[in-house]
Amino acid sequence: MSGPGPKYVWVDGQVLPADAPHLSVTDRGFQLGDGIFETLRAKAGHCTELPEHVARLHRSAAGLAFELPADVDVRLADGIARLLAAEGLDGPDGDASIRITASRGVWASRGLLPPRDVHLTPTLVIQAWPVEPPPAGHLEHGISLVASAVRRDPQNPIATLKTTSRIDYVYARIEARRAGADDAIFLTITGHLSEATTANIFLVRTAADDVLELATPSLDCAILAGTTRSWLLRWAESVGLRPVEGWLTPDELAAAHEAFVSSSVAGILPVTRFNGHPIGSGLPGPWTRRARADREAVFGQG
Ligand SMILES: Cc1ncc(COP(=O)(O)O)c(C=O)c1O
């Protein structure tokens, strides 16, 4: 059974009915999770930080040693515009979450190793959904996180790529649901904070020298280099918080004044419980609210 969803999908240059068959079963994305993706937001037909997402798509492809078409940025921008128009999400009130997926392509032979001498054409897909606002409780009361039993290895070269092989993340979400939490946070094999299943994590805290900091796990902590994360590190400086990227511990999360997670689609969401215990006052803090409001002022979305 397929759930309710969009009417159309963009596949390799064409807008097609969403419920038609689109892909070959020999596509390596389907067979092996040999693909990459991006998720972003478009308000009134304008994508937020599209060049940053396309740049990361290229980095993910390079990390898996496959090449995207040279004009992929133009094709994607055109595809997104056509898909949003087909879905009626390009009007002044349009608010869409967009997923771009690129697999290595179709290859009918068995085996893991991609061919060396044959150039596979990546399969490109775009999907768009109306954005559902976060449940009111998430903004008013914050979300709860639990630590996943799945650990992340900072030496793993795949850990920082946005690949379609997401089973660890699916597993962690199921763990969170079982624990009655909203999301899970991965720790590294050294026990440091990494990231949530679809978002980066931030702490507001007072440092030993009494300076208020916005701290987040560094890029070495097996995280995705979030586009919203980059924006927040610049934002911190502009509002007088000292931005810090480092190796943070679960104890530091538990002891923070405030915590929040960040992602392109859901924006900035307060985190008020970790492993069943309140963080700070147990309610969304002023810096979290300000970050969301300031991002909303810039992009029309928090
Ligand atoms: C695992 C993971 N970390 C972090 C992020 C946040 O990245 P961005 O801010 O670019 O959306 C995402 C977003 O999809 C993600 O999947």
Image (cartoon, rainbow, N blue to C red):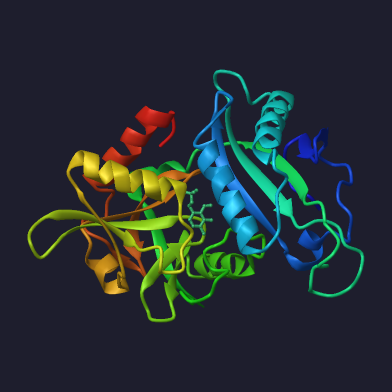
Where residue 269 sits in the image (x, y, percent)? 39, 48
Q: Residue furthest bottom?
A: 190
Q: Residue at the spot x=92%, y=64% of the render?
A: 108
Q: Residue furthest right?
A: 108
Q: Residue at the spot x=38%, y=48% of the render?
A: 230
Q: Quadrant of residue 186?
A: bottom left
Q: Residue at the spot x=30%, y=44% of the render?
A: 234
Q: Residue at the spot x=89%, y=59% of the render?
A: 25
Q: Quadrant of residue 105?
A: bottom right
Lateral position of residue 300 relative to residue 74, left or right: left
Q: Is residue 190 visible?
A: yes
Where residue 179 sits in the image (x, y, percent)? 48, 70
Query: Relative to residue 54, is residue 179 depicted above or below?
Result: below
Lateral position of residue 62 relative to residue 268, left or right: right
**Front residue of this view, candidates 278 and 95:** 95
Q: Is residue 289 visible?
A: no
Query: Relative to residue 75, is residue 182 depicted above or below?
Result: below
Q: Residue furthest top?
A: 92
Q: Quadrant of residue 75?
A: top right
**Front residue of this view, candidates 72 and 221:** 72
* Number of marks drawn: 0
**Front residue of this view, candidates 41 and 137:** 41
Where residue 240 sits in the image (x, y, percent)? 17, 43
**Front residue of this view, candidates 175 and 187:** 187
Where residue 125 sits in the image (x, y, percent)? 74, 44
Q: Residue furthest front?
A: 117
- State which quarter of the image contains the C terminus: top left
